[in-house]
Amino acid sequence: MRTTLITVFLAAISSAACFSSAMAADHYSASSNTAMSITGDIDMDDDGITFENGKGLTFSDLIADNLVVDGKRVPGSVYRVAQPLDPELKNGNRLCGAGKVTYLATWSDGEGSTAIAVFTGSRPPRSDDESCATYSKRRPGVRFSLARKDSTSLATLMIVRDEKALAPHVWDAAVVWCISRQHWSRPRLFR
């Protein structure tokens, strides 16, 4: 009985941590000169993006989970902007400078950073070639990597900080599912 209560208690704590972290936006540091001088650091989730100066864009919905980048289809997230804007950001610069931003796309640039492209067209973008601006961001701190372990219900969660693996931990499948639904469902969240 005591073991069952402890198990239920630990599962409740894990679930609460998972759902409370769902509310926090992911923080990204500007990693390109353009991003540093225009957007600064950002906070972003599936609901919107907030720039360093506090201005932001709200997303109405996720319209695609891939985009053509440099001629190749890559996994990513393409969002429709709820109220098209071209907000004034750092140093009086505009996010796009060529009209109101109607769509925003994110994807891994393959170098440990996340690329963010903004678009002004009335139709959903299919390629990064259609963007009016692209910014490079890096998510500081911890990155997660999931690997199946045997054919059991357990998986190994490896925590990586600054490209060095820290001690791996074995997590119950429910906790791994929670983390995976939280962070691995969108490629943009782990850069």
Image: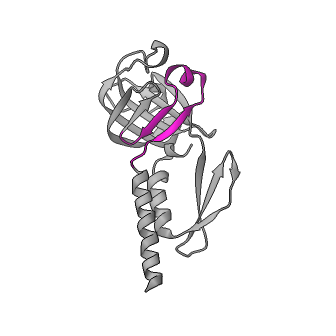
First to last magenta residue range: 23-47
Whether 25 is among the magenta residues is: yes
Q: Is residue 162 above or below residue 52?
A: below
Q: Residue furthest top?
A: 92
Q: Residue furthest front?
A: 2
Whether residue 184 is visible to the viewer of this picture, yes or no, is: yes
* Residue furthest to the bottom: 1
Q: In percent of the image, x 42 and y 15: which residue is there?
A: 97
Colour pattern of the rendering: one colour
134 over 80 or under it: above or below: above
Q: Position of residue 73 (x, y in %)?
A: 50, 41
Quadrant of image for the C terminus: top right
Q: Is residue 126 visible?
A: no
Quadrant for residue 81, please give it: top left
> Is 26 in front, or is 77?
26
Please provide percent x and percent y for residue 19. 39, 56
How many numbered marks have been drawn onto this rendered protein structure? 0
Q: Is residue 129 above or below residue 12?
A: above
Tell me the residue at 46%/38% (across/down).
67
Residue located at (50% from left, 20% from top) = 38
Between 128 and 103, the one nearer to me in the picture:
103
Q: Nearer the viewer, residue 65 or 94?
A: 94
Q: Residue 167 placed where, x, y %?
A: 68, 60
Q: Quadrant of the N terminus?
A: bottom left
Tell me the residue at 55%/76% (across/down): 152
Q: Quadrant of residue 120?
A: top left
